Amino acid sequence: MFDLIIRQANLPDGRKGIDIAIAGGKIAEVAPRIAAEAGEEIDATGRLVTPPFIDPHFHMDATLSLGLPRMNRSGTLLEGIALWGELRPSLTVDALVSRALKYCDLAVTQGLLAVRTHVDTSDPRLVTVEAMLEVKRRVAPYLDLQLVAFPQDGYYRAQDGVAALNRALDMGVDIVGGIPHFERTMEEGRASVQALCRIAADRGLPVDMHCDETDDPLSRHVETLAAETIRFGLQGRVAGSHLTSMHSMDNYYVSKLIPLMAEAGMNVIPNPLINIMLQGRHDTYPKRRGMTRVKEMMAAGLNVSFGHDCVMDPWYSMGSGDMLEVGHMAIHVAQMAGLDEKSAIFQALTTNSARTMGLEDYGLDRGCNADLVICQARDAAEALRLKAVKLVVIRRGKVIARTAPRLGQLFLDTRPAAIDPSIGFAPEY
Ligand code: FE2
C-alpha cells in the first residue's frame, strides 16, 4: 500500500505510460504498471511528469520592488544598480520578507521548488541578509532556498564591502559571491576573485559569482575564476553566473578558455531573459545578443543551468517565476531548436540545476524525494513550447499546489467546443 500513485505519466527522458508510486515522502517505485493500491491516485495520462524546476540564480531581496522608488529609465544594468542603491536605505526586514514570501508562493504554483538567491551585502546594516535568512527558515517545508553573499556594489569598491560580506557569511549565508567586473579596475576585479575564492576555501563554502556581466570582450575574470578554482581545489563547487562577455570574445581566446573552465568543473549559469534584455545596450546595429556560449559549453561537458535572475525589479520589469519561460528564451537566444537541443535545455532547468545547487535525492529514481510536477504538456519539448501550466505540484509526496488546465472554449458550429493547447482539442471538456 503506497501513499500516492501517479498513473500513466510521460517522463522527460521520453518514457511513456509510467506509474510512479510514493511512500513516506520518497519515490518507492517507477514502472509501466504498478499493481498496487494507494491512499490517493492521480491520473497523468498523456501528461509530462518531471522533477521540480530549479532556479540557480535569483535576487529575492529585490523581487517585486518594481517602481520603487522609480522606474529604470535607460533600461540598463548600470542604472538598475544605481536605482537599487537609491532604494536600499529604505529597505526594511518586514517588507523584504513579505515580498519574498509572495514570490515563493508564485514559484510553488510554477513547480519551482529550489532557488539560489544572491543577497546584497553592500549595506552594512545587512537587513537583506537578516530578511533572507528568515525567508529561508519560513519556506523550508516547501522550497529549498540557498543564499549567496553578493557584494552588489563591489567587494573592494563598496565602503566596508569586505567586512560586510564576511559578516553575512558569519550570519549563516551559504555561498560566497562576487562581482569582479564591477570593481574599480581589472586588477581589483582579479584581486577580488582571488580573495573570495580563498575565503570559500578557508570556510569550506561554494562560490557563485556574477562574472563578466558585460559586453566587454576584455572582461576575462572567468579565466581567473577557473584558475583560482583549480588552485584552491574547489573543482565542482564554483559557479560562474552570466559570463556574457564570452559572447563578444575572440574565438581563438575562447578555444583556450572553455577547456580551462571544464578542467575547473565550473558550473555555468546564463540568465537568458536578463541577458537578452540588458546586453548590447551600447550597440547600435547590428546588436549583440549577449548570452554566453551555451551550445559550445554543453559540448565541452560543462554543467550549464539557467537562472531567472530577476522578476519585477530595478533590472527587469517582466518575469513570472516560470522556468519554462527562461528555457523558452534560451532556445531562441542560443538557437537550440533541435529536438535533442530542447531536451538539453529542459535538463538544464532541472537536473543540471540540481547539480549546480548540490541538491540531494533529486530526480525520478527510486529513493529520490517525491517532489514532482505534472505539466499540461505531453513531453519536455511541448512544455517548453507552451510554457505549460503546472497542473499539480507535489512536495515530499503531498500535493502543495494545483492550477486548472488552460482551455479555450470555441463557439463555432463546425469546430470542437474546446481547445487544450497541448493535445490540440478536447471536446470532452
Ligand atoms: Fe544576478
Image: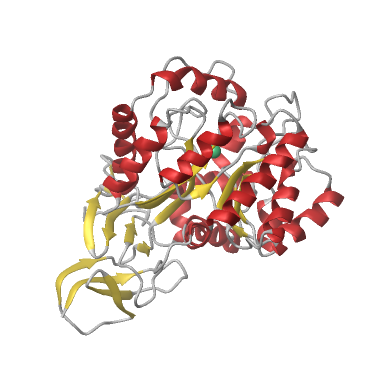
Q: Nearer the viewer, residue 248 or 48?
A: 248
Q: Nearer the viewer, residue 101 or 90?
A: 90
Q: Which image quadrant shows ligand 1?
A: top right
Q: Position of residue 239 (x, y in %)?
A: 59, 52
Q: Residue at x 33, y 52 (%)?
A: 143
Camera-nearest residue between 410 and 85: 85
Report the colour scheme. secondary structure
Q: Quick check: can you spot residue 415?
A: no
Q: Image check: 285 left or right of 317?
A: right
Q: Locate residue 426 relative to residue 377 in the image: left or right.
A: left
Q: Is residue 101 left or right of residue 188?
A: left
Residue 35 vertical position relative to residue 102 in the rendered view, above or below: below
* Residue 50, image quadrant: bottom left
Q: Position of residue 338 (x, y in %)?
A: 61, 58
Identify the image quadrant of the N terminus: bottom left
Q: Does residue 389 lie above or below 100 as drawn?
A: below
Total marks shown come to 0
Give the x, y percent position of residue 294. Answer: 65, 52
Image quarter for residue 320?
top left
Residue 72 can be seen in this image: yes
